[in-house]
Amino acid sequence: MNNAVAGFSKLSKEEKINWIANTYFSNPKEAITTIKQYWNNDSKLQQLHDEFIENTITNFYLPLGIAPNFLINGNYYSVPMVIEESSVIAAAAKSAKFWSTRGGFKATVLSSEKIGQVHFLYTGNPEKLTAFFQKNKEKFFSNTESITKNMQKRGGGILDIELRNKTNELQNYYQLHATFETKDSMGANFINSCLEQFAKTLKEEAAQYADFSEEEKNIQVVMSILSNYVPNCIVRAEVSCKVEELADKKIENPQEFAEKLVQAVRIAEIEPFRAVTHNKGIMNGIDAIILATGNDFRAVEAGVHAYASRNGKYSSLSHAKIENGIFTFWTEIPLALGTVGGLTSLHPLVKMALQILKQPSAHELMQIVAVTGLAQNFAALRSLTTTGIQEGHMKMHINNILNQYQATTEERKLIAQHFENNTISHSAVVDFIQKMRN
């Protein structure tokens, strides 16, 4: 069956929906009803959502929840989180409450540089290119003044521009490697606009540089683009307390628990198969708040995982130690975030999320996000090294199973009673439902 369509983007929203329903569903009316039931009743709000992306047909809902009681640098926060996975918010909230009685989380932005590059090919003498760059470096700054003036008023702008010779890795390949400070904006559009002007200046100045041969004047710009790898945009989050203060309802032997947790982290530091899952747990917390605040979780994910591999092997993003009777658990993580521009000023729930977080600056949001990731990681490691991960996860996941099988209120009561003293698994819940109904 040929499902190709010409001019889909030019169809009206109704026409797009009708084409999807008639092409892919045996019951088009039912498909159209499902699509439209997720529309917002407020036509202006729906139009706002429609215009976020292209070819919109409906809204795809994800739950927005709150993890309260995060004590960060002496201030309490309730953290908004958007995620579809059971137990994540419950785990974050539990971890937040646990540490709120043990001094809370400490967070510090260590650096906030962002990076952009102009990738180009140059055939000629590298020393002549270096001399050209040094002579014309100031022009890269002056030619972007119309772009940077507003950012400079807020304390940001272009920090530096370097010429990098990469010909030992790829023939004739060089870079203009630029660093930026973008203050409270994520700054993608700002950085890319600067880079495109750099590329224009590079070509124009090279074309009239007297010391270049005709071949050398013909610099070929391949692309100009920001990097989502930000190894100098780092935030540190940590918690610490005396080992004996770790004692809790499920931590009867705090020394044994601390040693086991440190060992679990060390395994993630040296074993990539474990590190990937370990870091996925950190990103459960990070992605959820990034989504809630209208930031780009794909960019953060890409940069974070590159950072986790910076020493040549994929490794843990968090670390733990016991020294002089003190347990310390921390992470240092790259986060390029914004609190102005983009969805932050458009999406009503994003604006609410930022209001709940007390209208943080970009640096404050970096701290909150890093702490949420660390809290999530602590909760996972605590479960793994004590009761096991499935006990808490399956208790939360059981609602999804019951919804899947459309369990009645009475059935839910009977199921809850049965699994108070029985191990929860997907198959066990399904078997009990079937037996109960038979």
Image (tube, grey):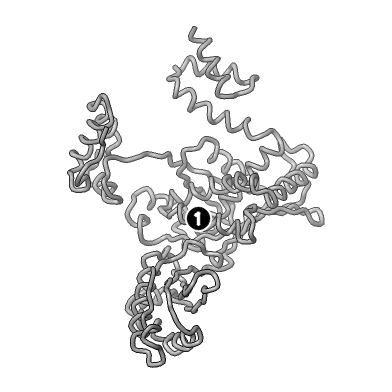
Query: Which quarter of the rendering shows the N terminus?
Result: top left
Q: Residue at x 44, y 90 (%)?
A: 135
Question: How many marks do you count on the picture?
Answer: 1
* Residue 202 horizontal/vertical position (percent): 38, 80
Badge 1 density bin: few <14, some 14–19, many ≥20, Cα 10 Å:
few
Q: Residue furthest top?
A: 438
Front-most of 201 and 321? 201
User: Mark 1 sits on what residue?
Assistant: 302
| 162 relative position to 242: left or right | left
Q: Nearer the viewer, residue 100 or 403?
A: 403
Q: Is 370 situated above or below 205?
A: above
Q: In the shown orientation, is residue 312 left or right of residue 356?
A: right
Residue 424 is left or right of residue 354, and the answer is right
x, y percent for residue 36: 26, 34
Image-quadrant location for residue 92: top right
Return the residue found at the far right: 324
Q: Please tell me whether residue 100 is drawn above or below residue 399 in the rendered image.
A: below
| Above or below: residue 437 compared with residue 117 | above
Three-letter code, disc 1: Ala
Visible residue check, residue 178: no
Q: Quadrant of residue 212?
A: bottom left
Depth check: give the residue in front, 167 or 206: 167
Which secondary structure lies at badge 1? helix
Tell me where residue 143 appears, x and y as whole percent.
35, 82
- From the viewer's perspective, is residue 431 above or below residue 189? above
- Residue pushed farthest bottom? 210
Would residue 304 be seen by someone viewing this image from the given angle?
Answer: yes
Residue at image location 57% in from the left, 50% down from the top: 373
Residue 311 rendering spot, x and y as whole percentages? 64, 61
Q: Residue at x 40, y 83 (%)?
A: 216
